[in-house]
């Protein structure tokens, strides 16, 4: 039987498409996320309650803190580096990948920094064309992106095992949570295997995720109003019911990394419940791992 966990509202600002939460700074108290389709990077301090944010010139799919200050942003024509003073520096784009041309309007979706320090970032088309997305790797200070997974529809959640021997990945429309073997170099992936598949009749689509200190995966479910925890055997051991249907991602935060922050989307739905698009908080009963910062 899975443990039931109760949430509270962390931030009442409603996102059309809230995504990609991170935690950083003193005590891991600086929680940041994006509102993709409204060009917003948003933040709230877990300790003080202070809030803030800024707007971007384009849709922004991720905002990951940098070791040197500022963020790496997943803008449509990016990725880009943003300095603390707002200065933007262009990084290599998909056009640097040999033969990689966007046949349909495409944007970045979820992204994370690996334990190796690489930026792993994925795409999807705006109208969700099947198999037109991909997953990429950007090695800091290199001159191009590398495509590492093809035939993706909605590139979404990702994380790495504590031993750094497994890479977990979600292509939402594949309806599964997948595992790759990770080579000793911390980069090469192989032997993809679906570890859990959405059962018939379950409306939830796997979205973003975060790993805990026990290698449990906390997966958000779009359309499912839930975050589920999967243990090493991919048994569901905990469920967090969210008062919003479209749950997008989660991150551990706070001095002890024992607090889970959960993002959602109202998706422009006229009949969305009142808390749809808000960001939520809970104590899941297990500690997480720190957000890897981008080393540039």
Image (cartoon, helix red, strand yellow):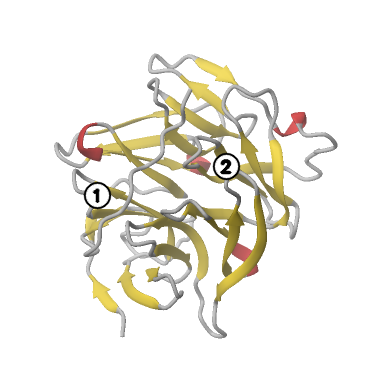
Residue at 56% over, 25% down: 80
Residue at 46% over, 74% down: 234
Q: In the image, which disc is placed on residue 120? A: 2
Q: Would residue 6 be found to the left or right of residue 231 on screen?
A: left
Residue 273, percent from left and from top: 35, 65
Could you tell me which secondary element the residue under label 1 belongs to?
Answer: loop
Residue toward you, 296 or 280? 296
Compared to 144, does 213 lie above or below?
Answer: below
Residue at 81% over, 38% down: 101
Question: Which quarter of the image is occupied by the N terminus?
Answer: bottom left
The residue tagged 1 is: 257
Residue at 35% over, 49% down: 14
Q: Would residue 259 be found to the left or right of residue 175 on screen?
A: left
Q: Quadrant of residue 283?
A: bottom left
Compared to 235, does 170 lie above or below?
Answer: above
Among all residues in the image, which is located at the extreme left? 48
């Amino acid at each position: 039987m899975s443990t039931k966990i109760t949430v509270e509202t962390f931030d009442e600002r409603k996102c059309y498409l809230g995504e990609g939460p991170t935690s950083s700074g003193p005590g891991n108290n600086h929680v940041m996320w994006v509102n993709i389709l409204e060009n917003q990077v948003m933040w709230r301090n877990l300790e003080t309650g202070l809030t803030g944010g800024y707007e971007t010139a384009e849709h922004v799919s991720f905002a990951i803190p940098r070791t040197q200050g500022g963020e790496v942003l997943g803008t449509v024509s990016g990725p880009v580096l943003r300095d603390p003073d707002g200065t933007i520096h262009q990084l290599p784009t998909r056009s640097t990948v040999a033969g990689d041309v966007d046949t349909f309007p495409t944007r970045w979706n979820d992204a994370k920094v690996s334990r190796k320090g690489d930026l792993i970032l994925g795409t999807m088309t705006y109208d969700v064309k099947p198999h037109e997305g991909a997953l990429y790797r950007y090695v800091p200070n290199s001159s191009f992106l590398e495509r590492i997974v093809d035939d993706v529809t909605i590139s979404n959640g990702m994380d790495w095992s504590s031993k750094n021997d497994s890479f977990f990945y979600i292509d939402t429309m594949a309806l599964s949570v997948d595992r790759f073997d990770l080579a000793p170099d911390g980069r090469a992936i192989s032997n993809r295997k679906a570890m859990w598949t959405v059962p018939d009749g379950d409306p939830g689509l796997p979205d973003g995720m975060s790993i805990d200190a026990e290698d449990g995966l906390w997966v958000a479910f779009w359309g499912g109003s839930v975050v589920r925890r999967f243990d090493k055997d991919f048994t569901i051991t905990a469920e967090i019911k969210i008062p919003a249907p479209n749950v997008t991602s989660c991150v551990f935060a706070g001095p002890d990394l024992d607090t889970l922050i959960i993002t959602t989307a109202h998706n422009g739905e006229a009949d969305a419940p009142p808390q749809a698009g808000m960001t939520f908080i809970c104590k899941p009963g297990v500690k997480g791992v720190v957000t890897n910062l981008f080393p540039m």
